[in-house]
Every structure is written in C-alpha cells, then in structure tokens.
Image: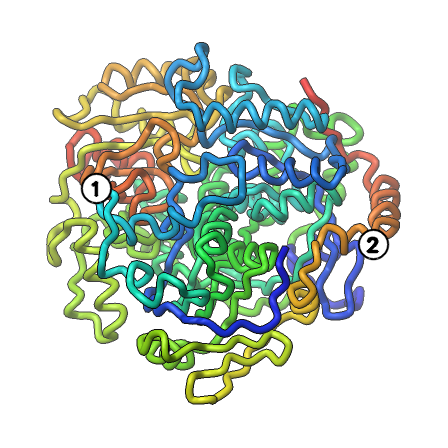
Amino acid sequence: MSATKPRTLFDKIWDSHVVERLPDGTCILYIDRHLVHEVTSPQAFEGLRLAGRKVRRPDATVAVTDHNVPTTDRRNGIKEEDSRIQVETLERNVREFGVPYVPILDVRQGIVHIIGPELGISLPGMTIVCGDSHTSTHGAVGALAFGIGTSEVEHVLATQTLLQQPAKNMLVQVDGTLGFSATAKDIVLSIIGRIGTAGGVGHVIEYAGEAIRGLDMAGRMTVSNMSIEAGARAGLIAPDETTFAYIKGREYAPKGEAFEQALAYWRTLPSDRGAHYDKTVRLDAATIAPMVTWGTNPGTVVPITGTVPDPMQEADEGRRAQMQRMLDYMALTPGTRMQDVPIDVVFIGSCTNGRIEDLRAAAAVAKGRKVAVGVQALVVPGSGLVKEQAEQEGLDRVLLEAGFEWREPGCSMCLGMNPDKLRPGQRCASTSNRNFEGRQGPGGRTHLLSPAMAAAAAVTGRLADVRQLVAD
Amino acid sequence: MDKFTKLTAVAAPLPMANVDTDKIIPAGFLKTIKRTGLGVHLFHALRYDNQGNERPDFVLNREPYRDAKIIIAHENFGCGSSREHAPWALLDFGIRCVIAPDFGDIFFNNCFKNGILPVRLPRVACDRLIEDAKLGGNARLTVDLERQVVVRPNGEEIRFEIDPFRKHLLLNGLDDIGQTLQHASAIAAYETRRRAEQPWAPAITAG
C-alpha cells in the first residue's frame, strides 16, 4: 500500500499489525490484547498443554469469569457442578500459564466486554480478540476488536497472532441528532433492520456521523457491540476527545508522559479524507424512534408505535415461511400493536447495555413507579465497578423500591447458561443483543430494546413507548 | 485435525436462513471442557421435543440423513455466537462439509480449524443441491477439495472458491499453530519494533 493513498481507520490498524503477508494474501496479524473467559478457553489451554506450549504474552492477556457465574450471592461458590468445573478450570489454567486474572469476588469482575474498556485494557489502535462474538464492543474506543473461536484462542495464546484475511470496509453514517428518548440501542437496531443480519458479512463497519459523535462511550459501545448481529466481523468508531477523556486515568491506561505519547498516536488513527469504503449506508438519526424486535433475529425490528408484520405481505416465499415460523415461535399475531404485547420478564444488563449510563436510564423511568404485578424484572450491572458506582448514586435503592431485583455482575439472562433463564413460553423485554430461538432459555421469547424501554415495559407489564412515561 | 480431500456422502437439506450457532448448539451445552461428545446435542431444539424425544420431521432424524456428512442450507449459516462448540457438534455428528450462500465469519473460520469444509455457492446452486439432497440415499454428492468442485448426482460439476492457504491446510490436515510458529522470528522482530515505536504501550500485570 502506498503511503499517500487515503486509508480508513480499519486499514491503518490492520496495516500496523501485519507481521507477515503470506503469498495468497493471508496475513499473520499481531494481537495486542487477548481477553479470556471460562466457556471458550478450556480446550485452548488443554491444547497448549498437550503440545507443550506456553502463553507467549501473559502481559497482553487477561482472564475473567462471566458467562457461567450466578448473579445471586457468590460467596459460597457456584452450585451448578458443570459451571463450577469450568470456572475452576479457568482458575487452574491462569495459575499454570501465568495469565492475569480478575477473580469472581474482585470488585473489578464483570462481563469481559464491560471490564476491558472500563479498566483501560482496551485502547485505540489496538487489535483485541476474545473467544466471544461481542468482542466487537471494544471497537467503540477505536480498536479493531473481534470474536474468535477456541482454536483461534489457542493460536493467540501460543503465538500472539492470528491468520487473517483482510476484511472489507463498510461505512455506516448516522447523520443528524436523535429524537427524544431514542438511544444508541435504537440506532443499532435500526441499522440491523436496514442492512439485515448478513448485511455486514465480510466487512468491518465504521460508524460515523453526527449522531455517533454525539454518543457517550457507553452508547458507542452499545452500537459497536451489535455489529456482529449485522454479520460484521467488527465495528469501529474513530477515537476523539470523548474517547480520550474516557480513557484517561483508567487502571491500565498509559499515565503521564506515556499518555501524551499515546494520545499523539491515537490522533493519527481516524480515517483519512477520501478513504475508500466498499459499502456505504446512511441513516437519519431524527427518524429513529424507540425500537423493539418482534421476531427471532435482531433484524426483525419495528418502532414501538408499529405492529407485528404480516407474512402474507411478503412476496418471497422463503422469507414468508421464515416470518411465519418466527411468529409461531413468538406467539404473535400479524397486526397486533407492539404496545399491546404483555411481558413476563424484564432483563436489564449484558455487554450491550450493562453500563452505568444504562442503569441510570432505567432508574430514571423506574423512579416512583412499581414493577407491574406478575412481572419479574432483573437489573444486572455489567461489572462490580458499575454496581459500586450505581450504589453510590442510589440507583439500587430506586430500582429496589420499584420492585426490580438488584443482582451481582455477569452475563446473566443474555444467554441462558447460568441460573438466570427464561422458562418455556415466557416473554422477555431484554436489553441484550440476541433474540434467537431459545437464546435466553429453551422456549423463551425475547424482545430486544433499550434500557429505558425495558424499564417502561417493567412498570407497565407490556411493551410500552417510554416517551409516554417520561417528560420531554 | 483430519485432512479433507474428497468426500462422497449423503447430504441433508436444511433450507433455512440465519441458522445461528445457538440453534446449532444451545448455550446450555457449552459447559464442557472437552471438544468431543456434542453431536448428540446438535440442533437440539430442532431435533428433540420438550420431552427429549426425536422430532420425526427434522431431517437429521430421518433415513438416510442420519448418516449425512454434508449439510446444505440457506444464507448466513452459523451466524451469531463465536462458540466453536458449533463445528465441534457438527463434526461429532459426522458432518464434514456445509454448503450455503454465505456464512457467519467466525463460524466459517472455526470450520477450517476442525477439518470441516464450508463451501460458499450462489443461492441458485444451493437450491439445486437441496433438490438433489431431497432424493436421499441414491443421490450422494461429491465434494472434491483438490479440484474445488461439488459434483451433483447427475455428474454436473459446480466450482467453488477457497483461499489457497486454507485449502493447503485442509488438504494436508495441518495444525495452523505449527504453521504460524514457522514464522516465529518474524513475530519476535515485530514485537521488538513495536516496543521501540510504542514505548508507552502498557502491560497487564496480575493483581
């Protein structure tokens, strides 16, 4: 690549991490940060052990438990045997291989994609990987961050590199400013609704435009987090003053003179004027309403003022059958107003929406109201530090008084592999990222929405338009 | 990893789009520290009813598809979660090749690490192969990686593309960590250069 050719943010990070380009274009890509959790790592460490290999860069690696852990009191350990074995296996592996570890009872424990940015581990310009598809979250700080499988986890542990083909560049430009009560979650659900769940396959999405620049870091992480739901390998947002202010002073961020040096480098990262994108999509933020999903993939989304769509209106036979299957699973009838759909459970948390800003938004709606009779509403802070901050601000009291449950940090009801699960047939208003069949528990039904919308659902007992509950 | 050269087998038609990895193997079965034994849980919610009995209408519960080694599906197969348990479950069931118009990127990568060949073909070609596959045991497909063709039961050949490096690893059953470690000196040189260029880059220390 010539030095004068304008490059995107992705191109710059990619180019600076290529160790070697193989004859067919496959690159050995250097990895700056490797985040490890209990579910996708045991087989990787076992592979190292069998081959007599070491972890090449323990100082670029950090491990934490999040997927399996219960969100109730953990001081007496984990009851479920298979979960406990996975957690204990991780603890044994980090000891054996010398990998830094955040223990379950440490205040810094939390969802891996919450704690990476929160602790200043995830920094602009880095390559960051984790055996989890929502690694795209870290792209919000201007890092190239993507999920990998367990064999690749082993590859990174052993070599600190990955074999990769370059992705294509896609620009998603969100112009204008968001309307009242519309959030980052509504932006990203709108994007996925527009481009579809495979719209980003083979691409890295760069999010740009006034509405993205106007988001705080929590909002940017929500957007970047769901890049994978559009099929993209990663999402990226150019680092700016909002990013730098967020990073400054965090535990593992550079300090003093080192921070200034880093800053000088980070300022060179944003895409050059005239850089080439293989695909460009534009949205007008002003047209984005609070959104909610009706089906079983995150692209099946309508404004809260909308209705359940009718498969008979779909011309393509395959898509019609797919819609019908979704409606059958979700037990929804075409034409039903989304606001008339009653819910059983509310889940506020996850790597998508488990940050302090998300909990503030939920508490603002919950304040002075009560969770509807018969509804279970969980609030699960994304990390111990988020929980601590929320308690200092009194958010826990607001939520508890309203009848929400206040839990310990973890992935919780996002993915149905710890005690927080939907029962078959239960319908959940969820701030998580996936509404796949069975995602929150076998037979469970998921409607994705923002934290404020989830709180509105909790206090009304149905999917509700938060704009009718809070003043402009 | 077993090498993949040429496979002639029964193919199971699965004409669904967006078969996510939660559908291939639900999270409840990820609490394992092994790679093997997941085949019984493959497509769990599609394959079994709430009592754990097989659903007779699901393709892999019917003859001859219980012995299928190939699956043909629609768009975006393997989207969603990065769980390598998805290819592990497919492999444990006996699947060595998935043919679809496109795939979730992480799943696509994961297949190659486990000796499974994911083949991208246009939707019309997939639909033709699905019709072939519906004919069952007398209509086996052949997937020839060396020649990069899928051979229909009528002898027609459909060419597919694959990265040369991945093809090489799969044909020879090579462990890619071993391949990368042949470039260990380049990795070390890169690390030295980066430390000089970015002395500010922090290290993560325990505690």
Return the residue nearer the eye: B191 or A45.
A45
Relative side of A178 to A264, left or right: left
Neighbourhood count class around disc 1 (C-alpha, 10 Å): few under 14, some 14–19, many 20 upward: few
Q: Position of residue A421 (x, y in %)?
A: 30, 32
Judge whether A361 appears above or below A18 on screen: above
Q: Nearer the viewer, residue A146 or A397?
A: A146
Callout 2: residue from which chain?
A: B
Q: CA distance from mark 2 to mark 1?
A: 51 Å
In the picture as drawn, the residue positioned furthest to the top comes out as A76
Residue at horizontal 41 percent and vertical 76 percent from the top: B126
Please tell me whether mark 1 sits on a helix, a strand or a loop. loop
Name the residue that disc number 2 marks.
B182
Identify the colour scheme used: rainbow
Residue in front for this viewpoint, A223 or A212 = A223
Q: Chain of mark 1?
A: B
Q: Specify the label residue B51 is tagged with.
A: 1
Q: Residue at x 22, y 26 (%)?
A: A376
Q: On the rendered structure, is A290 left or right of A261?
A: left
